[in-house]
Image (tube, rainbow, N blue to C red):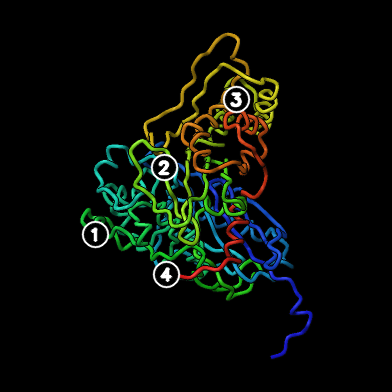
Amino acid sequence: MSTSREDVSAPAYILGIDLGTTSVKAALIDSDTKEIVSTASSETGAGVSSEIGPQGNEQDTSKIIRACSACVSGLPRDNLVKVRSIGVSGQMHGCVLWKSGNGWSNTGTSGYDTDKCSHLVTWQDQRCSSEFLASLPAPKSHLRLATGHGCATLFWLQRNRPEVIQEYDCAGTIQDFLVTMLCNLQKPLMSVQNAASWGYFDTINKVWNIEVLSEAGFPVHLLPDVKIPGVEAGHLESSWCGIPKGIPVGVALGDMQCSILPSLKIETDAVLNISTSAQLSFKMPRNFIPPHSEPGSAIEYFPYFNDSYLAVAAALTGGNALATLVKMLQQWMHDLGHETPQAQIYDKLLSSAQETKETDLVISPTLFGERHLPNQRASVTNITTENVSLGHLSRAACHGIISNLHDMMSRDFLVKSGVNRIVGSGSALTRNKVLQQEIESIFDLPLLYGQGGDAAVGAALTRTMKFTD
């Protein structure tokens, strides 16, 4: 069959999707130039109350999937018909369950009905106490287990809500669920990146700790098959949002790794990404074998691409701490009889902090603890009559976020590891000059901002790379 010159020269695009904690992002890149053609985002509004109370952190899976379809549909339709591959990333650690063949239905209107699957139990979930985690078998993995990790969540459900486990026969991260749905797979596939984030996964041999889990009564039938990052998971089962049926879809990836990929162009760089949470990371040398995480150590080694690893300080404290501060102030204003939009409060916080160049007010903003210190909580100290203004409060909160990261991965550790520059990215960082000032002051390393950091772009870029399973 002949092909016209017009067909040969027609641009082809790659779609990248990132299912984040609060929003979905989509990006189209040119498959040849790797340049970004178009982007879109949609807030999910997916948070729901958990039946177990404040310790639970859950999201409505159907709202996330609807936001995804809306986000992709927001890209130019003339470009969507030229999409030739799809890459997907999303929030790591979380767990959603569904029944094979009954987890979704194609509505035929660029969307899916996913009301029959479970809520997503997110990475922020706190149901697995330190005592509960101590009752679980030790993983045969260099990575520690923490609350919010998929396998810990499934252990908790097996012991406390066995009827939930009995209702479903598939499980995965939210991004694994999306790929399974788009490709109409009977059993989910999971990348090494997402498997490592669940716990009980040996990243060296790329296998689950089946024997350990089975002996402890874990529902091992729910564990997905695992593939190396970057390989194909399947093909688009039907046309979606104007994207042609049959195009390849990559196995779902971790949002941290995909957010780093566009930024990490020089191996002596470290990448600092601050969005809902925060991560400071750099790539380890070739043939690096990760050591087991020591108790209390804040640094872990996560699988990246092509059998390489990242040294990572993954903080649970990031933009979510500032968001909590904004919500608190909004509630106080409401209690005083004034309704003030959150955006207005946030802008006022930043402008006030800009006017307050330094403060002796000390805020440790670790509201959610940290994985290496799960019982740590936030605190405010050294309060005086001179430092109780809004500017001092905001400046101290931003300082605390960066100080917490520095406590986890210090400037000295970076320099000794060969890092000579930090690349900053992430929505909570790139639009917050105060956080940027605190990084420059605390880390005292050359800094570059706004270069990459978009996990949707990173997910798309992986579809241009070569991998073998």
Name the secondary structure under disc 2: loop
Which one is in front in this view, the residue at disc 3 or the one at disc 1? 1
- Whichever of callouts 3 and 4 sits on the residue coming sooner in the sequence is 4
Q: Quarter-wise, where is residue 331 in the image? A: top right
Give the amino acid at mark 4: Gly
Residue at the spot of label 1: 211
Measured Cα–Cα span from mark 1 to mark 4 = 28 Å
Chain-order first, disc 1 or disc 4: 4
Label 2 close to label 3 by CB (< 8 Å): no
Spatial separation of the CA atoms under disc 4 and disc 2? 28 Å
SS under mark 4: loop
Task: Mark 2 or mark 1: name the one nearer the start of the chain.
Answer: 2
| Outermost residue, right side | 6
Residue 460: give x, y in percent of width and height.
61, 61
Depth check: 174 or 16 in front?
Answer: 16
Query: What residue sits right under mark 2 in the picture?
Result: 125
Amino acid residing under circle 1: Glu
Disc 2/disc 1 C-alpha distance (Å):
26 Å
Give percent across and percent down for residue 341.
66, 32
Is any part of residue 415 visible from this angle?
Answer: yes
Inter-mark Cα distance, 2 to 3: 28 Å
The residue located at (49%, 25%) in the rendering is: 364
Is 469 located above or below residue 200 in the figure? below
Indicate the quadrant containing the C terminus: top left, top right, bottom left or bottom right: bottom left
Compared to residue 277, the image places residue 29 above or below, namely below
Picture coordinates of residue 199, whole percent (x, y): 36, 51
Q: Earlier in the sequence, mark 4 or mark 2?
A: 4
Q: Is residue 145 visible?
A: no
Disc 4 target residue: 101
Q: Marks 3 and 4, how far apart in space? A: 47 Å
- Hey, what amino acid is under mark 3? His
Q: Nearer the viewer, mark 2 or mark 1?
A: 1
